[in-house]
Image (cartoon, rainbow, N blue to C red):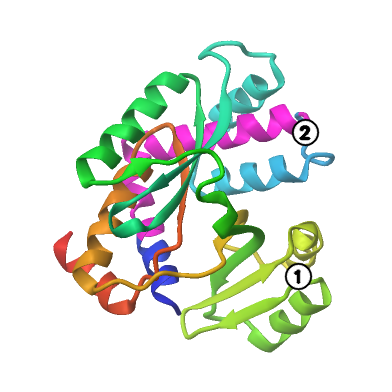
Amino acid sequence: MSGHSKWATIKRKKGAADAKRGQLFTRLAREIAMAAREGGGDVDANFKLRLAIDKARANNMPKDNIERAVHRGTGEDREGGVLEQMSYEAYAPHGIALLIDVVTDNKNRAVAEIRRILTRAGGSLGEAGSVAWQFTRKAYFEMAAEGKDSDAIFEMAVEAGADDVSVGSDMIEITAPVEAFKSISERLRTAKLAPDEATLRMEPQQQIPLGVDDTVSVMKVIEALEELDDVHTVYSNLQVSDEAVAAMEAAA
């Protein structure tokens, strides 16, 4: 499993602590609301909403919270303000490119908090188009390898349109064109395989390697951004090594 994947897995395990302070539920609710706003509140007709709700249930989000998030997205519940979805382009220290996806009911607050973290670390917000060209949108799936028939999953994913399947000792990762997202999801669902992650994400066209200390410093900036309530996801072109992940864990 790559350093990036190990880092993502570690961060996901920290989700239990996030749930206790409500941060995880806030993000999940916003994800559900945005999906409902874009495609309606019917999970049978809105595949993105179904995935968001499945993810919320997997994290033990209460049913009432899920229903309120759906109603907020469809406009049936107007409490909490109107949510906006946007993406900011930025640079972390050492010239690492960042794409910061935000879902917020207060755009001014979101951009001020992002700018504060970047400025303090020696980074900066970028102009529109300065970073996005370095990334390509992809469908991405990840699941634990234990107890899975990796050969069967490989064949299934390729038949459904995947262009890369990485089988490690801990994780199986599937990357595919955006248009294959639904077909792969449905094949996994039919096979009763529930991925830990099923999403559309931005993949860097080229990863930038740094020394361990510099890599860790950028990782800390990314985690600080991800801890903001308004920030949904942070993508980077940083190459994360196993050594950097180990150093990050040791420093925690």
Task: Tell which of 94 and 237 is nearer to you.
Answer: 94
Q: Residues within 10 Å of mark 2 (few under 14, many from 20)?
A: some
Whether the magenta-drawn stretch holds residue 109 is answered as no
Q: Residue at x 76, y 65 (%)?
A: 184
Q: Which residue is drawn at 35% across and 36% down?
A: 228
Q: In the rendered image, which quarter contains the C terminus?
A: bottom left
The three-letter code of the residue at mark 2 reads Gly
Q: How crowded is mark 1: few (under 14 residues within 10 Å), some or many (20 or more)?
A: few
Residue 154: percent from left, percent from top: 70, 82
The three-letter code of the residue at mark 1 reads Ala
Indicate which disc residue 39 carries.
2
Residue 62 seen anywhere in this rendered image of the structure? no
Q: Residue at x 70, y 79 (%)?
A: 153
Residue hosting label 1:
191
Residue 198: percent from left, percent from top: 62, 58
Q: Residue at x 50, y 20 (%)?
A: 105
Q: So how many labels did they put on this image?
A: 2
Sequence-wise, the earlier of marks 2 and 1 is 2
Q: Which residue lies furthest to the left in this view?
A: 251
Magenta region: 11-40
